[in-house]
């Protein structure tokens, strides 16, 4: 090979390690030796960059793949499980067609910490491409944000918090995809590493799915690159996200962040929809994949390799934004807004015409367009040409095949049973002492100031916008009452205490949120955000969380159809994020007419609590507000969780439920308050609540404050016909009548009474200061 | 034969799908016409400019698309009396093209929908707009009731009407102020205005009353299923709420 090599053979471990570090490689010395050994020579500079990307944690899941096998991935709703750019869940039939909802979930944590606007925006851009390339129309996005302390106006954390939201808004709004769901938490352990998780949904008919691999007869087909001109941005991005953030390298890290272009993406999406139509009319097969980590090389190699083929790609045919770019930058740089097709040669001209002429990509952005850059080959090698010469020539399975870093798997003990009787609050406290403090807590207060910057209603399909219920919902099929619901969850206060329980609770919470709007939970995605896996403590947390995800999903009959692992979420000072398993749940609504929102609808309704109060208040906002330490997370009894879900579904299906709200951060009293606030702001109605003293409905199982503010979970429901509801829930021990709605703007609990207005203001104000 | 309506798609437009859909649901023969097919525009009876970020909102929202060749057909049609409805970004384009309020020459705007105030931030929030002219003053609103209250979603970063005092006075005196922001009960005050818009303006019409520019999106609250509270036994797929503006638009095109 004429192209300069990266010397490995005969170089000492010490020299090789420093050469790798100087070049900014994430590959370890043993990995470099493995590559040279398999190639039988020193790798070229292009090859070493290619392996650096493909063998990064980000692409290879090398230290998590063997663990992820523990997750359930199959079930009656699964149309497409993990392994492609996105998974697909069967959402229902309409006009004789089976429809799938495509779902993908990723993190863009490192880029968002370094360059928050661009990092968060390109996170949305990437996840949208993952859904698009399954042949789907993109119908919704959601985001889970974990941010540092924003109290100080001049802090970097506030800058990150604002810019991340600006970036998500700028991108999602411009491409015209509604932001349907999400959550946000603030914690000092995100000060140096924010988490930005993004989820996207798509809609596709089962027979129209396009796979992210070359079809079986693809030998000799063309590889067509679509999108933005390739530039030097995002060079080393995959490797960058697979190392710890080092503040000293901030400048170098910035170069690894990609530059978003939602304007161009808007047009590429619409042009791609037109290409889908063209291929469907002619019943043509094709492969389609998003360019993410590893750039042109990573995408084309995975497309062809997963189909059992090799590839030859000519870098000279790539539209380059800058003259004289080095082949390694062209090959693995992560310029945004690009996708790759594998097409029969006779189809290529029509597809190029759609992108380049009908949608005039070259006039939309300089150098943008669609161009054939290579060929699918029978020989299973991955070959890159540059200047007429081979600069990379490796066995394709070495590049994209499974690699594993078999770290010893610690045995994670089963969580200890929690003593349900033990109280952690000393003495008795009045509700009035803490109600406003809970409502104004950073994890409880209104999120509206944040999400009102996101367009939640573009496309005109929105049934439940953010803030109206526990899950967002859309009616994505024109002319059909079928609906899709979505929620994203994961609580870092729980993650700090117990990674496994936190994972279980994230699954339960996401399923509950979807159920609370009357949807049938279909399936899950997960994103595992953790510290350095080579730190045994963080690795044990990761293993425990995966176990928790697996247990909860099996118990609730759910499968994971896609997901992402984001490790190394720590800075050089060793400050790692709390264990953050984040879960999204998609649900189906047979008829959006049956949806339930959280706002109280009218005075005089009966209020019920579906769930079980516990004294275990570990990880709760209540524990933080009272300064209680040492308490465990609540016990999880899956039979009860399933029973709660079934009771609620039955009652909603029978049309008995006026409003429903999942109980999470801030507990039952917070849920009640939010239902009253929503009545005012969303319906213009004054509806308060009168609750019996908790001792009347807990039967003494938990203290009053624990019952009102504890986070053992469940639902609050507003019911018009109490007798019918009682009949529907007869024999279920965890359904309790707790009070009624009233016509006064107040919440009365036992003998205490609170005016709604000051509570509402305490809840509304805190984030309005961060997001004016 | 129902009237042929072109829903214009510029590079960066993002609301063509729902706009076409509501036009069709009220009986119009609407289709999206993309920039590469600009030459077909003169054959349409009416034009709708939907929301989005045409040409990326470069310079000012609406400034570049106002000079796009697609607008030649729209301007010519408007001058010959064809109906033109612009929503959100489409409204911004109509102002930049000088078609509304239409008090100056074409493509020499006398007013603009510009950066929200006091905080220059994109805002997505549910609003109501109230008809502030006699319905018959504008052909597109002629079938609405007096002071009709229409639910819609404001979703924009540049929706504040701005003009100098002289032009604002012209807008007020000339009956150009078609819609103002209002509360759900129809009352009008500054708290109902989500963006600091002068005169509480949510929509403007031209002198001839054949062109209407409206900032909030009635097409995003235009079917029963869009209202989280309005579906007690109703057909969730039926047009409602914001659809009334499109129904009035269709009524005006009935004899076309």
Image: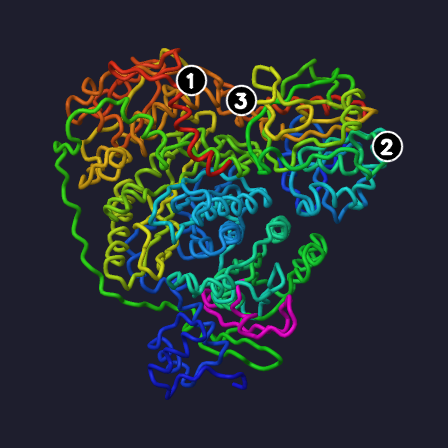
Residue under label 3? B235
What secondary structure is found at the residue carrying circle 3?
A: loop
Give the quarter of the figure containing the C terminus of chain B: top right
- Does residue A129 show up? no
Which color scheme does this rendered protein use? rainbow
Residue under label 2? B79
Residue sitting at x 59%, y 70%? A374
Residue under label 1? A601
Is the residue marked by circle 1 packed among few (<14), some (14-19), or many (20+) residues within 10 Å?
Answer: many
Q: Earlier in the sequence, mark 2 or mark 3?
A: 2
Give the image location of residue B150, x and y in percent.
62, 21
Q: Both on one chain, marks 1 and 3?
A: no
State which quadrant residue B249 falls in.
top right
Q: Is residue A205 above or below residue A603?
A: below
Residue sitting at x 56%, y 75%? A327
Residue A514 within the segment the image draws in magenta: no
Left or right: B140 with respect to A174? right
| Span highlighted in magenta in the image | A305-334
């Amino acid at each position: 090979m004429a192209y300069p090599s990266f010397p490995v053979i005969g170089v000492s471990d010490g020299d090789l390690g420093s050469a790798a570090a100087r070049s900014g490689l994430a590959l370890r010395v043993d990995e470099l030796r493995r590559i040279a050994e398999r190639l039988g020579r020193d790798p070229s500079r292009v090859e070493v960059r290619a392996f650096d990307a493909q063998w990064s944690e980000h692409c290879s899941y090398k230290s998590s793949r063997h663990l992820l096998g523990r997750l359930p991935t199959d079930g009656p709703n699964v149309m497409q499980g993990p392994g492609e750019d996105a998974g697909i869940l069967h959402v229902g039939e309409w006009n004789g067609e089976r429809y799938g909802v495509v779902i993908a979930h990723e993190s863009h944590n490192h880029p968002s910490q370094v360059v928050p606007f661009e990092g968060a925006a390109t996170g949305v851009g990437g996840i949208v491409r993952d859904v698009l390339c399954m042949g789907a129309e993109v119908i919704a996005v959601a985001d889970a944000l974990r941010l540092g302390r924003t109290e100080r106006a001049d802090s970097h954390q506030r800058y990150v918090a604002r810019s991340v939201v600006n970036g998500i808004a700028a991108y999602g709004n411009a491409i015209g995809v509604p932001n349907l769901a999400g959550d946000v938490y603030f914690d000092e352990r995100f000060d140096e590493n924010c988490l930005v998780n993004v989820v996207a949904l798509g809609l596709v008919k089962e027979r129209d799915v396009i796979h992210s691999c070359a079809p079986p007869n693809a030998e000799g087909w063309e590889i067509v690159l679509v999108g933005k001109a390739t530039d030097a941005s995002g060079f080393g991005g995959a490797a960058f996200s697979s190392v710890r953030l080092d503040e000293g390298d901030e400048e170098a890290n910035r170069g690894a962040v990609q530059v978003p272009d939602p304007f161009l993406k808007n047009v590429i999406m619409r042009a791609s929809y037109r290409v889908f139509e063209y291929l469907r009319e002619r019943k043509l097969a094709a492969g389609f994949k998003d360019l993410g980590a590893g750039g042109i090389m990573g995408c084309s190699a995975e497309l062809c390799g997963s189909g059992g083929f090799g590839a030859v790609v000519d870098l000279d045919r790539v539209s380059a934004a800058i003259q004289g770019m080095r082949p390694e930058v062209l090959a693995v740089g992560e310029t945004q807004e690009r996708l790759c097709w594998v097409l029969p040669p006779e189809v290529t001209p029509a597809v190029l015409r759609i992108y380049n002429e009908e949608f005039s990509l070259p006039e939309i952005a300089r150098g943008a367009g669609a161009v054939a850059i290579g060929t699918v080959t029978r020989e299973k090698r991955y070959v890159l040409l540059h200047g007429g010469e081979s600069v990379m020539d490796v066995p394709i399975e070495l590049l994209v095949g499974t690699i594993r870093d078999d770290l010893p798997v610690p045995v994670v003990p089963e969580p200890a049973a929690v003593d349900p009787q033990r109280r952690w609050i000393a003495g008795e406290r009045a509700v009035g002492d803490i109600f406003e403090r809970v409502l104004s807590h950073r994890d409880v207060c209104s999120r509206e100031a944040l999400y009102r910057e996101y367009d939640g209603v573009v496309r005109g399909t929105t049934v439940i916008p953010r803030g109206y219920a526990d899950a967002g919902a859309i009616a994505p099929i024109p002319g059909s009452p079928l609906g899709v619901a979505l929620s994203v969850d994961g609580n870092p206060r729980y993650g700090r205490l117990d990674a496994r329980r936190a994972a279980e609770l994230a699954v339960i919470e996401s399923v509950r949120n979807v159920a609370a709007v009357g949807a049938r939970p279909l399936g899950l995605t997960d994103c595992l955000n953790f510290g350095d896996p080579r730190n045994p403590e963080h690795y044990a947390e990761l293993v425990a969380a995966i176990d928790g995800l697996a247990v909860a999903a099996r118990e609730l009959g759910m499968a994971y159809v896609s997901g992402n692992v984001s490790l190394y979420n720590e800075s050089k000072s060793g400050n790692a994020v709390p264990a953050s398993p984040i879960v999204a749940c998609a649900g189906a609504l047979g008829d959006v007419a049956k949806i339930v929102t959280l706002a109280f609808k009218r005075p005089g309704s009966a209020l019920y609590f579906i769930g079980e109060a516990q004294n275990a208040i570990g990880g709760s906002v209540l524990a933080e507000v009272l300064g209680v330490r040492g308490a465990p997370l609540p016990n999880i009894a899956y039979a009860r969780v399933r029973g709660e879900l079934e009771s609620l579904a039955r009652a909603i299906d029978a049309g008995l439920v006026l409003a429903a709200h999942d109980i999470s951060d801030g507990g039952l009293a917070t849920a009640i308050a939010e239902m009253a606030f929503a009545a005012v702001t969303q319906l213009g109605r004054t509806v308060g609540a009168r609750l019996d003293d908790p001792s009347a409905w807990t039967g003494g199982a938990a203290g009053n404050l624990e019952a009102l503010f504890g986070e053992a979970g469940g639902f609050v429901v507003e019911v018009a016909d109490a007798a019918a509801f009682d009949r529907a829930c007869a024999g279920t021990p965890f359904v309790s009548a707790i009070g009624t709605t009233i016509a006064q703007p107040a919440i009365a609990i036992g003998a205490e009474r609170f005016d709604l207005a000051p509570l509402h203001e305490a809840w509304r104000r805190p984030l309005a200061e961060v997001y004016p | 034969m129902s009237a042929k309506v072109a829903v214009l798609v510029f590079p960066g437009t993002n609301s063509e799908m729902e706009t076409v859909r509501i036009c069709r649901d009220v009986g119009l023969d609407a289709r999206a016409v993309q920039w590469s097919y600009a030459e077909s525009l003169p054959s349409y009876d009416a034009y709708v400019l939907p929301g989005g970020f045409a040409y990326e909102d470069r310079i000012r929202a609406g400034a570049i698309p106002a000079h796009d060749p697609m607008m030649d057909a729209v301007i010519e049609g408007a001058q010959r009396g064809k109906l033109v409805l612009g929503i959100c970004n489409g409204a911004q384009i109509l102002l930049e093209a000088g078609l509304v309020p239409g008090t100056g020459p074409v493509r020499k705007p006398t007013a603009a929908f510009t950066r929200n105030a006091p905080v220059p931030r994109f805002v997505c929030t549910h609003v109501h707009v109230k008809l502030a002219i006699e319905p018959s003053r504008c052909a597109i609103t002629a079938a609405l009731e007096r002071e009709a209250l229409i639910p819609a979603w404001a979703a924009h970063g540049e929706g504040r009407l701005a003009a100098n005092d002289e032009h604002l006075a012209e807008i007020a005196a000339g009956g150009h102020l078609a819609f103002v922001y209002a509360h759900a009960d129809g009352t009008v005050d500054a708290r109902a205005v989500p963006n600091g818009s002068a005169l509480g303006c949510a929509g403007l019409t031209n002198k001839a009353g054949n062109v209407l520019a409206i900032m909030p999106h009635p097409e995003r609250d235009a079917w029963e299923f869009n209202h989280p509270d309005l579906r007690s036994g109703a057909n969730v797929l039926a047009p409602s709420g914001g659809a009334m503006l499109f129904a009035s638009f269709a009524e005006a095109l009935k004899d076309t």
